[in-house]
């Protein structure tokens, strides 16, 4: 699986958009980009994933650059409950399990 | 829909003792995963089952850790004997059939403290 690089921490004001970046410059053509988040004392929770095209669901939007070397997770209107560690993962076809890094700790402030 | 169930929620033991964790995945999910999460780090895969067979156990410390999923449903993870460095949260996850384009569902984990 390709290595991903994320900033260790970010802040966001409540009600504003939170844009979480992820670099995956060695990603291969068949690797999906997954985003999970982990709220304190809970297991990781799936947010969104994509291969080439931008994706949107009820939780977030995922923007993948045309060269697929980086992506951005967008939480359009962050709330205090969005405070969590966010993991960006490149997942290959050769393995099924997710390999987590350290993620980005997002703090949403009032 | 019921989620992934894990027990116990917390466990405190002394080093060299044994401990076991239990996981019941979402009904119908063929793939089950055990992860170890040390404080401040992301989860690390220990073992992955497809039904009752092991797909990947390359990161499982087999001298002290063992896991089984005898009937292809629930699973147990055992540590014997425990070391101080085993203090961590042990997370169980499941997915429908383990293919690349699907999501994993995680339980809340068992927090283990080894004294």
Image (cartoon, helix red, strand yellow):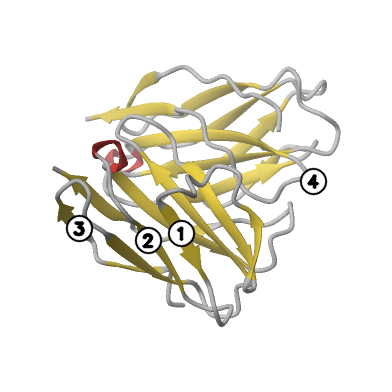
Same subunit, tags 1 and 4 = no
Q: According to the image, label 1 marks what residue?
A: B66
Nearer the camera: disc 2 or disc 3: 2
Q: Residues within 10 Å of mark 1 (few under 14, many from 20)?
A: some
Q: Is residue A25 above or below residue B51?
A: above
Q: Residue at x 47, y 76 (%)?
A: B74
Q: CA distance from mark 1 to mark 4?
A: 27 Å
Q: CA distance from mark 4 to mark 3?
A: 35 Å
How far is mark 2 from mark 3, CA to CA? 15 Å
Q: Are marks 2 and 3 on the same chain?
A: yes
Q: Quadrant of residue A49?
A: top right
Residue B78 numbered tag: 2
Q: Is residue B50 above or below residue B65?
A: below
Q: Earlier in the sequence, mark 1 or mark 3?
A: 3
Do discs 4 and 2 belong to a common subunit? Answer: no
Q: Disc 1 to disc 2, how far (Cα)?
A: 5 Å
* N-terminal-most mark, 1 or 2: 1
Q: Position of residue A23 (x, y in %)?
A: 63, 19
């Amino acid at each position: 699986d390709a290595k991903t690089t994320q900033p260790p921490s970010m802040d966001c004001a409540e009600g504003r958009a939170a844009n979480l970046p992820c670099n995956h410059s060695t990603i291969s053509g068949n690797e999906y980009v997954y985003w999970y988040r982990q709220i304190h004392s809970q297991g990781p929770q799936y947010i969104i994933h994509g291969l080439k095209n931008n994706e949107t669901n009820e939780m977030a939007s995922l923007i993948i650059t045309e060269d697929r070397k980086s992506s951005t997770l967008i939480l359009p209107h962050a709330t205090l409950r969005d405070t969590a560690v966010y993991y960006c993962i490149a997942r290959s076809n050769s393995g099924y399990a997710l390999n987590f890094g350290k993620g980005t700790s997002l703090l949403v402030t009032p | 829909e019921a989620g992934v169930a894990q027990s116990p929620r917390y466990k405190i033991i002394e080093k060299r003792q044994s401990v076991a964790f239990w996981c019941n995945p979402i009904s119908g999910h063929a793939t089950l995963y055990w992860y170890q999460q040390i404080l401040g780090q992301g989860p690390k895969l220990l073992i992955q089952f497809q039904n009752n067979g092991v797909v990947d156990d390359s990161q499982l410390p087999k001298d002290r850790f063992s896991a089984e999923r005898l009937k292809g449903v629930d699973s147990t993870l055992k540590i014997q004997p425990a070391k101080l460095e085993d203090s961590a949260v042990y997370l169980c996850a499941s997915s429908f059939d383990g293919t690349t384009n699907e999501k994993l569902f995680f339980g809340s984990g068992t927090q283990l403290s080894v004294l």
